[in-house]
Amino acid sequence: MIITENVHCISTFFTNQYLIVDGHTLFLIDTGLRGNAAKIIRSIYAIGHHPSALKQTFITHADGDHYGAANGLIKSTGCRIAASRLEAEAMIAGSSSRELKPKGIFKHLLPLTDGLFRADPTNVDTVLEPGLTLPILEGLKVLSTPGHTPDHISFYLPKHRILFAGDSIWLKNRAPCPSRGMNTWDIELSDKSFQAQMALNPSFICAGHGILKLY
Ligand SMILES: [Zn+2]
């Protein structure tokens, strides 16, 4: 799915990944679950590029449904992996950066989904500092958006008003809202991050589990 000429969404199972095309170089935001590398590679071919064009994969946070396929992509493309400091530490350990807080029935269901959401230890080449503007498509900003996890980051293309929000923004009934519930590390921070991102007045919210065009 094309969001703009240079930004493509790759939907796999229940996650979204985003491919940014800058000339002959590709950048990916998040990878989805462990088995997703083949679909991402097919999507790269489908838009007329060779997998070796993927130079860098940015990870918004260390949940297995966001970095699970990173190792597969490293093998098949040679791309480098970038993440924030605390999320990188969790990825290197093959874990998440926070404990889940299941309540009620979820206490029993959570262990059943463990295998699906698990990611293998993953090497991180670059630690991204929030506040940085990467030289991609006239500037890709790295935003600090903690709350869902302790060091969650988002990415923003001001020129195109496209926000890549990972899991810091959820889309429910086509309305954006902050991360909530058992997989939210800190609700207050989640609200603050949500408000700061909405204040940017994005035209597109490209989230980990949905896309919303606002205007
Ligand atoms: Zn998450």
Image: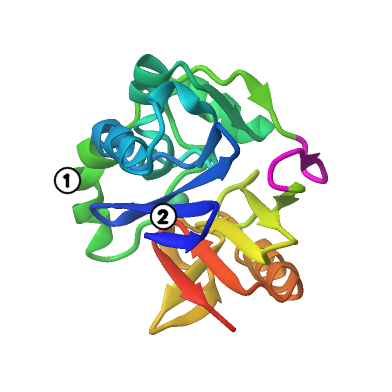
Residue 188, relative to residue 55: is it above or below? below
Q: CA distance from mark 2 to mark 1?
A: 29 Å
Majority SS type along the magenta span: loop
Drawn side of residue 58 relative to residue 68, left or right: right
Q: Position of residue 18 (x, y in %)?
A: 47, 49
Badge 1: residue crowd in 10 Å (few <14, some 14–19, many ≥20) = few
Drawn side of residue 162 relative to residue 170, left or right: right
Secondary structure category for the residue under label 2:
strand
Q: Position of residue 85 (x, y in %)?
A: 68, 30
Quadrant of the snapshot with the C terminus: bottom right
Q: Is residue 136 magenta?
A: yes
Q: What amino acid does circle 1 point to?
A: Leu
Q: Position of residue 105 (x, y in %)?
A: 22, 64
Q: Which residues are magenta?
A: 129-137
Judging depth in this view, the residue of 85 and 183 nearest the camera is 85
Q: Which mark is residue 112?
A: 1
Q: Which mark is residue 9?
A: 2
Q: What amino acid does circle 2 point to?
A: Cys
Q: Position of residue 139 (x, y in %)?
A: 76, 47
